[in-house]
Amino acid sequence: MICLTGDTHHDRLDTNEQLWLREQGQTISEVDVSLEYVQLCAKYDVKCTLYVTGRTLADQWTQFEPIAKVEICEVAGHTFEAFPRPASERQKTMAGGGVATSHAGTHGSYEDQDEDVRRMCGIALERLGAPIVSWRNHGFVHDANTDEILYAHGIRYVSDDLNWDKLHPEQLDSGLISHPVNVIMDHDHLYHAHRTPAYVEKQRENWSFTSEPTSESFTIERWGELVMEQVTHIAAAGGVATVLAHPICMYTADRFATFERLLQQFAAYPGIHARDVGAVVGGNPGGTDGL
Ligand SMILES: [Zn+2]
Ligand SMILES: [Zn+2]
């Protein structure tokens, strides 16, 4: 079973990738490429869950609305503001020879995080007409308060864990159900956009996701092969393969060519939205076909 996921950010976040696109003279926005992404999912009949920042729904609703209308796509929460870090601050880090990530590394105080989640859930209800129940934090940033706050605001499914050994969704003490990203994620393992070999070499010095077995980066073609190897293995074990493929990464890497090849292959497996993973916690003992 495959849970295909992507994250979409508002254009004013000025992520390194958005800045890179503009440097190339491209006027297409991250929301535009996200619409192409979900349309491709619809073309191949592959379910996807798109975690989107609240700021996107608030400020770019006209652009985003067609995405919300694509039935095969579940819209979920990705924090309201995504911990913006001023471009000027990042440029200073880069000038000093460091690697500047697009976002800050913390939610701030309990109250700050509570307010951000409240705003995300509020704008989602307003724009989508129904509450969101699934969540991934931008940059996987979470702390000791996160689960309690999410649960209190009605979130039930989270995908913040990066762990290749967890093949099944799991029930957490907080009441949330977690479905770890258990397939090699795209962004941090791909040479694309601003992630040149030199950039990657510097970033590896500070890699913090120790539970993920590799900090290597690959070409988009090789990454696609690795994804299918892991998906095949997880499906054979009767698990849920949670794949993270960001719209903007898939676009900047090779204009969706690899993503479309993956969709063709994903179509052979049952798909599942994040909001439905509660039905397969700990595996599905009744399943016989290993899919
Ligand atoms: Zn994000
Ligand atoms: Zn990327």
Image (cartoon, rainbow, N blue to C red):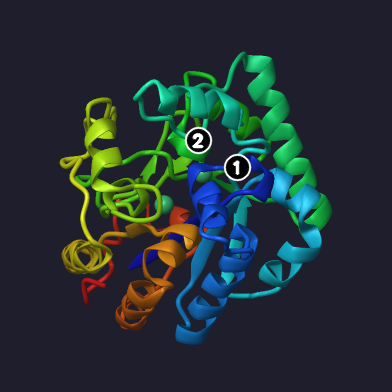
Foreground of the two, 198 or 220: 198
Foreground of the two, 201 or 122: 201
Is 147 on the left-hand or right-hand side of 198?
A: right
Helix, strand or loop at mark 1: loop
Q: Are the residues at dot 2 and dot 1 in contact (C-beta closer than 8 Å)? A: yes
The crowd level at tag 1 (other Cα within 10 Å; few <14, some 14-19, many 20+) is some
Q: Amino acid at mark 1?
A: Asp
Residue 46 locus on image (x, y percent): 45, 77
Q: Where the C terminus falls, by quadrant?
A: bottom left
Q: How many marks?
A: 2
- Return the mark for residue 14: 1
Foreground of the two, 151 or 102: 102
- Does residue 165 lie above or below 237 as drawn? above
Q: Where the N terminus falls, by quadrant?
A: bottom left
Helix, strand or loop at mark 2: loop
Residue 134 locus on image (x, y percent): 56, 49
- Return the mark for residue 102: 2
Residue 61 locus on image (x, y percent): 78, 58
- Does residue 161 lie above or below 48 as drawn? above
- Does residue 28 lie above or below 260 as drawn? above
Under 8 Å from ligand 1: the CB of mark 1?
Answer: no
Q: Is residue 137 visible?
A: no
Q: Earlier in the sequence, mark 2 or mark 1?
A: 1
The crowd level at tag 2 (other Cα within 10 Å; few <14, some 14-19, many 20+) is many
- Return the mark for residue 255: none
Q: Residue visible at 60% across and 42% down?
A: 14
Residue 38 locus on image (x, y percent): 55, 72
